[in-house]
Image: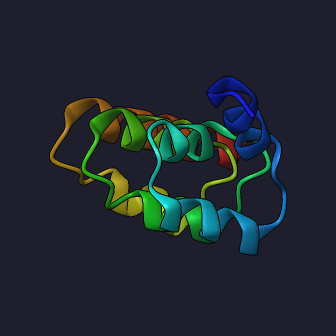
Amino acid sequence: MHAEEYLQVVRNCANEEEQFEFLKQNKPGMALELAKSTNVSPRVLDILTRHPLITVRHEVAKNPRCAVETLKRLSSDKDMLVRDYARRTILKALK
């Protein structure tokens, strides 16, 4: 399987246990694809808030599947864009 096909599998995965397995593999692009996924579990998103790559945290903060408590924590992130994305996602969730 090519890298793009594999990332597509990650992106479309709706099984939380499989998502945790993808995280354990720590292959390039996997965390970012999970963070952007519309199928990712809120628990996986919560774990991804601690990811060292800022782009992953950006996508977590923008993801509507992210739990409000997780977004509240991200609204205090050291990165200004993460904070802004988290606040915007909270506002959308409250509508």
Q: Quadrant of the C terminus?
A: top right
| Residue 25 location (% of width, % of height) | 51, 61
Q: Which residue lies at the image location 62% right of the left edge and 69% below the top edge?
A: 21
| Residue 3 location (% of width, % of height) | 62, 29
Q: Which residue lies at the image location 55% right of the left edge and 47% below the top edge?
A: 90
In the figure, 25 relative to 55: above or below? Answer: below
Say left or right for 19 vs 74: right
Q: Nearer the viewer, residue 81 or 13?
A: 13
Find the residue positioned furthest to the left. Answer: 78
Find the residue positioned furthest to the front. Answer: 1
Q: Quadrant of the N terminus?
A: top right
Say left or right for 69 vs 95: left
Q: Which residue lies at the image location 33% right of the left edge and 54% below the top edge?
A: 51
- The answer to whether residue 35 of the structure is visible from this angle is yes
Q: Which residue lies at the image location 44% right of the left edge and 43% below the top edge?
A: 86
In the figure, 7 relative to 31: above or below? Answer: above
| Residue 82 location (% of width, % of height) | 33, 38
| Residue 64 location (% of width, % of height) | 67, 44
Q: Nearer the viewer, residue 52 or 91?
A: 52
